[in-house]
Image (cartoon, rainbow, N blue to C red):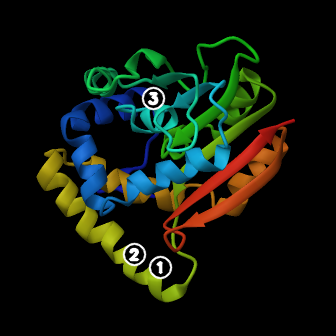
Amino acid sequence: MTVGSKPLQKDAHYIASMFNAIAPRYDILNHLLSAGLDRRWRARAIAELELNGQETLVDLCTGTGDLALAAIHSRRSGARRVVGIDFASEMLHLGAQKLQRYTASSSVHLMRGDVSCIPLSDESADVVTIGFGIRNVSDSRLVCTEIRRVLRPGGRLAILEFSMPSTAILRGLYRWYFTHFLPLLGRLVSRHSEAYSYLPASVQSFLTPAALSALLVESGFTNVRTIPLTCGVVYLHVATRA
């Protein structure tokens, strides 16, 4: 799989620099390119975790903190404390500015770190979330192992990730949107030549939902559920640490 004429690469420094470059327009493009559905996807992920207000939640690949904030401001019950981790410093900078606009910002702590080596101690989290980030790592198995390490026994995990619709007609339409319209609009708004060509390439080269679920089981998770959202454009994976 290639990005333009270049092979798809998932080197941490390359990915971080790409996200740093698009950080100022990242949120607006997320909302625009998903027609606002990204908010619903994050809300559904938090709802499936059934938080009771006492949890320490770790949000990996937190970006500008939207999923971290959703975990605090859940309509039902939010986490008591959220730690958001990302390796893109500009994304975290914008996330910190965003947090200042919310009264619960003191409950969210953002820190720079790599999900392949999570900078937290063993069994220190009740819940882990990762929204649209696991496909960007070079070793998904290592990340799943790290997530299991930081979760307490019985801790819960929610992963949101893009996929391709299961039905042939929708898949064809979505593939056209994903490989033609989205990269063009992404380049115009973000002014980055590769980031929104990387997105469809990374989705199409990533594990299928079934393969990701199997990897979670192999990594020591139980009660794995795979939930298609918006006709399979996004899948939500929910699991429990054994």
Look at mark 2 in the image and give the residue it sits on: 174
In the image, 68 versus 105, the foreground residue is 105
In the rendering, at what x and y percent does residue 6 appear? Answer: 34, 50
Q: Nearer the viewer, mark 2 or mark 3?
A: 2
Task: Examine the image and state in which quarter residue 178 appears.
Answer: bottom left
| Residue visible at 34% across and 32% down in the picture | 64
| Residue visible at 26% across and 48% down in the picture | 194
In the rendering, at what x and y percent does residue 30 appear? Answer: 31, 51
Q: Are marks 1 and 2 in contact (CB under 8 Å)?
A: yes
In the image, 187 versus 217, the foreground residue is 217
| Residue visible at 57% across and 49% down in the picture | 45
Look at mark 3 in the image and give the residue it sits on: 12
Crowding at mark 1 (Cα within 10 Å: few <14, some 14-19, many 20+): some
Distance of label 2 from label 3 (alpha carbons): 28 Å
Does dot 2 land on a helix, a strand or a loop?
Answer: helix
Indicate the quadrant containing the C terminus: top left, top right, bottom left or bottom right: top right
Number of numbered discs: 3
In the image, 184 versus 227, the foreground residue is 227
- Identity, as a three-letter code, of the amino acid under mark 3: Ala
Look at mark 1 in the image and give the residue it sits on: 171
- Identity, as a three-letter code, of the amino acid under mark 2: Tyr
- Identity, as a three-letter code, of the amino acid under mark 1: Arg
Q: Is residue 76 visible?
A: yes
